[in-house]
Image: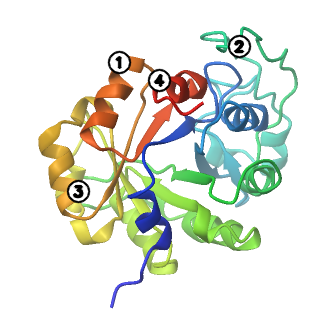
């Protein structure tokens, strides 16, 4: 018998939930504690973030496989120790993409550390409601067309995420997502009680959908351009919740809500909350 995922069941019946994409990344440095806190303050009912392991096996919250794009450092995350990563300024390359609806630009941001997943869970526990959801994307390289992975994928990140979830008793408030089907399979083998989300995009180098059976995931996480009546009907028939990325256009969020999706992942939580009439 497959486990019952209470969170997955609840989210399918609670209307459209707004998730801050890497926090409120249009207004604050992505994947930092200030960005996550701002998303909470703007009325998001969840956040999306990215995790990977340092050279010495510590979980770090960062989207890119290198630190070059968002920090004052350089190099691959997997080649840097936790101490080296924590010396970097996660706000070094930040440029605001917009001003919040309230007209108050947050910041200035200086010398922000790359957070750990533990630190994010602690923030959520202290600043958000018990029904707030954290969508944890496990960063993993795309697998080959035959489903095989390189050795860099087998680094134990799934076990590290599960341990962090347990330390903060977040099992009822997390969805684990990835573009990589084997990553999701390894996590489900460890924690079948926690729902996983299958991330998909049209430009994937291989047809990952062919590697993922419907029974292997609880949530479908497509790019918004892939969402239409047919795809929503298919995943709804399969009993999946649908969380869509990355949606910053109020007109688009209205279309998606009308189709019956459960989640909107956005860089501008305040704008999407307003578009949905939730604040």
Q: Are marks 2 and 3 in contact (CB under 8 Å)?
A: no
Q: CA distance from mark 1 to mark 4?
A: 8 Å
Q: CA distance from mark 3 to mark 4?
A: 24 Å
* Residue at figure coordinates x 79%, y 17% from the top left: 106
Secondary structure found at label 1:
helix
Residue in the foreground of this view, choosing between 166 and 236: 236
Residue 5 sits in quarter: bottom left
* Residue at figure coordinates x 29%, y 44% from the top left: 260
* Residue at figure coordinates x 34%, y 60% from the top left: 181
Residue wearing tag 1: 251
How crowded pointer 3 is (Cα within 10 Å; few <14, some 14-19, many 20+) is rated as some
Q: CA distance from mark 2 to mark 1?
A: 20 Å
Q: Are marks 1 and 3 in contact (CB under 8 Å)?
A: no
Residue wearing tag 3: 236
Disc assigned to residue 275: 4
Label 2 or label 3, whichever comes before in sequence order: 2
Label 2 or label 1, whichever comes before in sequence order: 2
Residue wearing tag 2: 102
From this viewpoint, which residue is outermost toward the bottom? 1
Tell me: residue 28, above or below residue 138: above
Residue in the foreground of this view, choosing between 152 and 203: 203
The image position of residue 127, as x and y in percent, is 80, 47
Secondary structure found at label 2:
loop
Is residue 64 among what the camera can see?
no
Label 1 or label 3, whichever comes before in sequence order: 3
Q: Is residue 86 left or right of residue 22?
A: right
């Amino acid at each position: 018998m497959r486990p019952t995922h209470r969170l997955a069941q609840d989210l399918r019946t609670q209307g459209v939930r707004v998730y801050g994409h890497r926090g409120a990344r249009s207004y604050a440095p992505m994947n930092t504690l200030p960005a996550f806190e701002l998303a909470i303050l703007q009325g998001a009912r969840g956040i999306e973030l990215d995790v990977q392991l340092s050279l010495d096996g510590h979980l770090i919250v960062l989207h890119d496989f290198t630190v070059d794009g968002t920090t004052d450092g350089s190099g691959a995350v997997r080649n840097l120790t936790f101490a080296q990563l924590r010396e970097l300024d996660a706000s070094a390359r930040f440029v605001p993409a917009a001003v919040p609806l309230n007209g108050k630009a947050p910041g200035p941001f200086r010398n922000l550390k790359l957070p750990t997943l533990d630190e994010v869970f602690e923030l959520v526990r202290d600043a958000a409601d018990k029904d707030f959801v954290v969508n944890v994307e496990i960063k993993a390289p795309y697998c080959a067309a035959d489903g095989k992975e390189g050795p860099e994928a087998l680094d134990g990140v799934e076990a590290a995420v599960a341990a962090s979830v347990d330390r903060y008793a977040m099992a009822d408030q997390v969805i684990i997502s990835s573009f990589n089907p084997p990553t999701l399979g390894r996590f489900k083998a460890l924690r079948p009680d926690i729902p996983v989300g299958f991330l998909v995009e049209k430009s994937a180098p291989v047809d990952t959908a062919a590697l993922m059976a419907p029974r292997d995931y609880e949530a479908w996480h497509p790019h918004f351009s892939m969402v239409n009546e047919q795809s929503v009907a298919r995943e709804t028939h399969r009993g999946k919740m649908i969380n869509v990325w990355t949606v910053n256009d109020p007109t688009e969020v209205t279309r998606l809500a009308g189709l019956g999706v459960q989640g909107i992942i956005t860089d501008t939580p305040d704008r999407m909350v307003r578009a949905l009439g939730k604040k």
